[in-house]
Image (cartoon, rainbow, N blue to C red):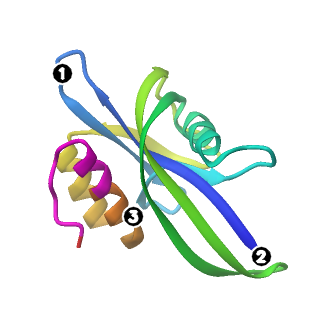
Amino acid sequence: MKEISAGGVVYRHTDQGKLQIQLIQDRYGKVSLPKGKMEPGETVEQTALREIAEETGLIGSIIAPIDQIKYQYDHQTLGKVDKEVHYYLVEAVGGTLQAQVEEIRGVDWFDPLEAWKRQKNSGYDNNHRIVAGALQLLGIEVDPR
């Protein structure tokens, strides 16, 4: 079975022109990115924007694709599942920052290098290259390892 999810690295510029990156804290206490499963009739882009809005309260605009993560996991009833997650660089264009408490513990904005540090220290290893790719698209170079 194949399962497709989508999400994004959300950014904004403050009123002072400072670039900020959004990170979520998932239900396990890890630093992560908003994402979720594709629903019937949706494109991956629509899925990414819907999941960002549901999990963080923000309305986004896709700027560019970042990359995909592919892996397998064992589901209790479905057996082996091939998982594919599409990530996009997304600019926050509206909404109000509010964590979906049923899904995640929290959401906040960080300076880009602080976001990178948090990702490296408390995030999932397979998200390192996603966050690094987003920062690179925004003109900030970090070592994705």
CB atoms at circles 3 and 1 under 8 Å apart? no
* Labels 2 and 1: the sequence-earlier one: 2
**Which contiguous range is marked in magenta?**
133-144
- Estimate how packed mark 2 is, as few (under 14), some (14 to 19) or many (20 or more) residues with alpha carbons within 10 Å: few
Residue displayed at 49% across by 68% down: 69
Q: Is residue 90 above or below residue 79?
A: above
Estimate the x, y position of residue 34 in percent, counting from the top left: 51, 48
Mark count:
3
Q: Quadrant of the N terminus?
A: bottom right
Q: Earlier in the sequence, mark 3 or mark 2?
A: 2
Residue type at mark 2: give it: Met
Q: Residue at x 63, y 71 (%)?
A: 83
Residue nearer the viewer, 127 or 103: 127
Q: Residue at x 63, y 39 (%)?
A: 46
Q: For numbered disc 3, what is the local secondary structure?
A: helix
Residue 33 within the segment the image draws in magenta: no
Circle 3 crowding by C-alpha within 10 Å: few under 14, some 14–19, many from 20:
some
The quadrant of the image that shows the C terminus is bottom left
Q: Which mark is residue 127?
A: 3
- Looking at the image, the residue that sits furthest to the right is 77
Per the rendering, the mark at residue 83 is none
Residue at the spot of label 1: 17
* Badge 3 amino acid: Asn
Q: Which residue is mark 2?
A: 1
Residue 111 appears left or right of 29: left
